């Protein structure tokens, strides 16, 4: 199965998600947050650095719960910003 390449906008959205998660993690270690979300630290690292720009819904939901973020907040803060 061939996956359709991501658009630049999709990549940017993934980078925004990664930055938001990294800020929300604060001083907590990557290992601690990944464990709380039921993920590997490498998966969290890939998401935070934008190397995994389209994580699965349940992965994002688990991270949001572990970090005390609402899914609504994530959607608003990571949505594509319309061009001015």
Image (cartoon, rainbow, N blue to C red):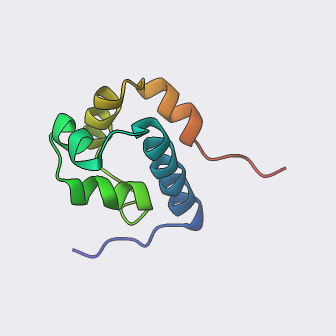
Q: Position of residue 9 (x, y in %)?
A: 59, 60
Q: Which of 83 and 38 lies nearest the eye of the viewer?
A: 38
Residue 78, quarter of the rendered image:
top right
Q: On screen, 32 above or below 49? A: above
The residue at 43%/61% (across/down) is: 49
**Residue at the extreme bottom:** 2
Q: Quadrant of residue 3?
A: bottom left
The residue drawn where x is 45% and y is 51% is: 18
Q: Is residue 40 left or right of residue 79?
A: left
User: In which quadrant is the N terminus drawn?
Assistant: bottom left
Residue 37 relative to residue 68: left or right? left
Q: Position of residue 53 (x, y in %)?
A: 41, 59
Residue 6: x and y, percent?
Answer: 46, 67
What x and y, as percent, mark residue 39?
Answer: 17, 47
Quick check: 5 above or below 37? Answer: below
Q: Quick check: 6 above or below 68?
A: below
The residue sitting at 42% across, 27% down in the picture is 71
- Residue at x 21%, y 37% (from the top left corner): 37
């Amino acid at each position: 199965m061939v996956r359709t390449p991501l658009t630049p906008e999709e990549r940017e959205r993934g980078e925004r998600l990664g930055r938001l998660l990294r800020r929300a993690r604060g001083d907590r270690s990557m290992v601690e947050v990944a464990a709380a979300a039921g993920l590997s630290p490498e998966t969290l690292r890939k998401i935070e650095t934008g190397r995994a720009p389209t994580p699965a819904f349940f992965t994002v939901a688990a991270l949001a719960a572990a970090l005390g973020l609402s899914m609504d907040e994530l959607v608003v803060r990571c949505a594509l910003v319309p061009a001015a």
